[in-house]
Image: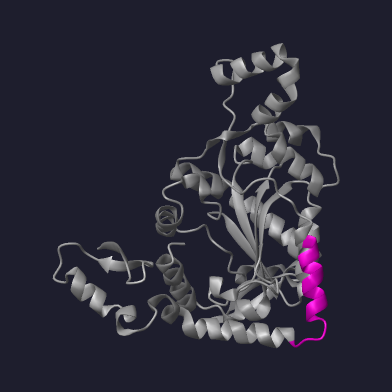
């Protein structure tokens, strides 16, 4: 059983899971069974109830007197982050004297003093280094500078297997990072206690280590979902998959989300490449079925990631307000995935 791609009457592209070519149902019968053929938008119908629930949570939050100020301060911090390019997965610069491309480029740079600055920027990835320097007060340790020079911005990753191997290497490192950030900003993690969904603050885990066993850590993106997103959203471009390794922290106050952002910005191992601020008051929640969070893509360039060969890997961290996290359910998430599939996202 595969997935049928087609178009509705208004030209909107749709995807129908579970359709097997050559089966008993033909296209006319299939189209007639779609909600839109009966006057209902199939995309919106999937998530209508969940969207209303999230919108109600947001409306209630906005009634809090300090909400506007907290949201504006968060927006200010996020606006101060100025990445120079979109997040993408790149390979390392090939190593060794036998790399003819690097060798010729280096010789050309040495012979052409006037072009040196431009060409060195091209082959060293200094744009990325400048991002890091701006985010960390203008100075980066020399070994980190060298790591940036090893990112080959002319060589996007094309292997899905490679991404999953790198993601598996980054995952435990990212997990330790989010624990540090949560401790510094009153963050919580989803947990299950005797079958009941709850949230545990990392401060409490530090005081009572046994609580760590209750935490339900975010896992790597499932390969099937990665392939869906790769084909439907990115036209088969593997390098655009930047959320295979991901994690999340839950917060009770927007001011704590802001504190986490500031903590991450001060982390010398982290370079933020993109921030999606769905907590912005001007954000159109219909784009995410009412759901809101702050999602950022980043690289972790540390001695450990460099040694493992995964310092170029881009991962994702989500900062979520507790009412939104509480409203999430396994059924709702599956509907949201269908919603995004239908939108080719």
Residue 18 appears in view: yes
Residue at 74% of width from left, 44% of height from top?
Answer: 131
> Residue 38 appears at what percent x and percent y?
30, 84
Q: Which of the 4 quarters of the picture holds residue 89?
A: top right
Instruction: Answer left or right for 77 relative to 249.
Output: right
Residue 183 appears in view: no
> Residue 265 appears at what percent x and percent y?
78, 54
Q: Residue furthest top?
A: 111
> Residue 111 appears at what percent x and percent y?
70, 11
In this view, the residue in front, 316 or 111, is: 111
In this view, the residue in front, 34 or 303, is: 34
Q: Residue furthest front?
A: 10
Was residue 74 drawn as part of the magenta stretch in this picture?
A: yes
Quarter of the figure that contains the N terminus: bottom left
Q: How many marks?
A: 0
In this view, the residue in front, 259 or 104, is: 104
The answer to whether residue 226 is above or below residue 154 is below
In this view, the residue in front, 254 or 308, is: 254
Q: Which residues are magenta?
A: 63-77
Instruction: Answer left or right for 338 relative to 193.
Output: left
Q: Name the main secondary structure of what is drawn in magenta.
A: helix
> Residue 164 appears at what percent x and percent y?
49, 48
Instruction: Answer left or right for 82 relative to 212.
Output: right
Q: How is the image coloured?
A: one colour
Residue at 42% of width from left, 50% of height from top?
Answer: 235
Residue at 36% of width from left, 71% of height from top?
Answer: 10
Q: Which of the 4 quarters of the picture holds residue 177?
A: bottom right
The answer to whether residue 125 is above or below residue 342 is above
Was residue 143 drawn as part of the magenta stretch in this picture?
A: no
């Amino acid at each position: 059983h595969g997935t049928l791609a087609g178009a509705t009457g208004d030209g909107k592209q749709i995807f129908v899971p579970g359709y097997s070519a050559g089966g008993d149902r033909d296209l006319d019968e299939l189209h007639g069974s779609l909600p839109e053929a009966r006057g209902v938008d199939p995309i919106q119908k999937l998530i209508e109830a969940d969207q209303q629930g999230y919108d109600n949570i947001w409306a209630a939050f906005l009634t809090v007197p300090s909400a506007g100020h907290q949201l504006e301060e968060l927006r200010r911090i996020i606006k101060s982050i100025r990445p120079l390019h979109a997040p993408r997965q790149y390979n390392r610069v090939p190593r060794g004297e036998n790399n003819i491309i690097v060798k010729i480029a280096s010789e050309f740079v040495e012979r052409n003093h006037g072009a040196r600055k431009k060409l060195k920027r091209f082959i060293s990835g200094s744009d990325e280094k400048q991002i890091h320097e701006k985010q960390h007060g203008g100075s980066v340790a020399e070994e980190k500078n060298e790591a940036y020079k090893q990112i080959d911005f002319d060589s996007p990753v094309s292997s899905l297997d490679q991404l999953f191997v790198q993601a598996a290497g980054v995952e435990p490192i990212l997990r330790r990072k989010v624990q540090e950030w949560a401790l510094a900003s009153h963050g919580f993690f989803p947990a299950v206690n005797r079958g009941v969904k709850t949230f545990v603050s990392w401060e409490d885990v530090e005081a009572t280590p046994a609580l760590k066993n209750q935490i339900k850590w975010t896992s790597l993106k499932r390969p099937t979902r990665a392939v869906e997103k790769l084909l439907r959203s990115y036209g088969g471009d593997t390098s655009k998959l930047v959320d295979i390794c991901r994690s999340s922290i839950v917060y009770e106050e927007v001011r704590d989300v802001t504190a986490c952002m500031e903590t991450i910005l001060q982390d010398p191992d982290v370079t933020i490449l993109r921030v999606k601020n769905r907590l912005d008051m001007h954000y159109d929640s219909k784009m995410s079925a009412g759901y809101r969070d702050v999602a950022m893509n980043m690289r972790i360039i540390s001695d450990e990631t460099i040694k493992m060969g995964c310092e170029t890997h881009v991962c994702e961290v989500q900062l979520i307000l507790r009412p939104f996290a509480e409203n999430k359910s396994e059924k709702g998430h599956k509907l949201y995935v269908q919603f995004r599939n239908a939108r080719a996202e």
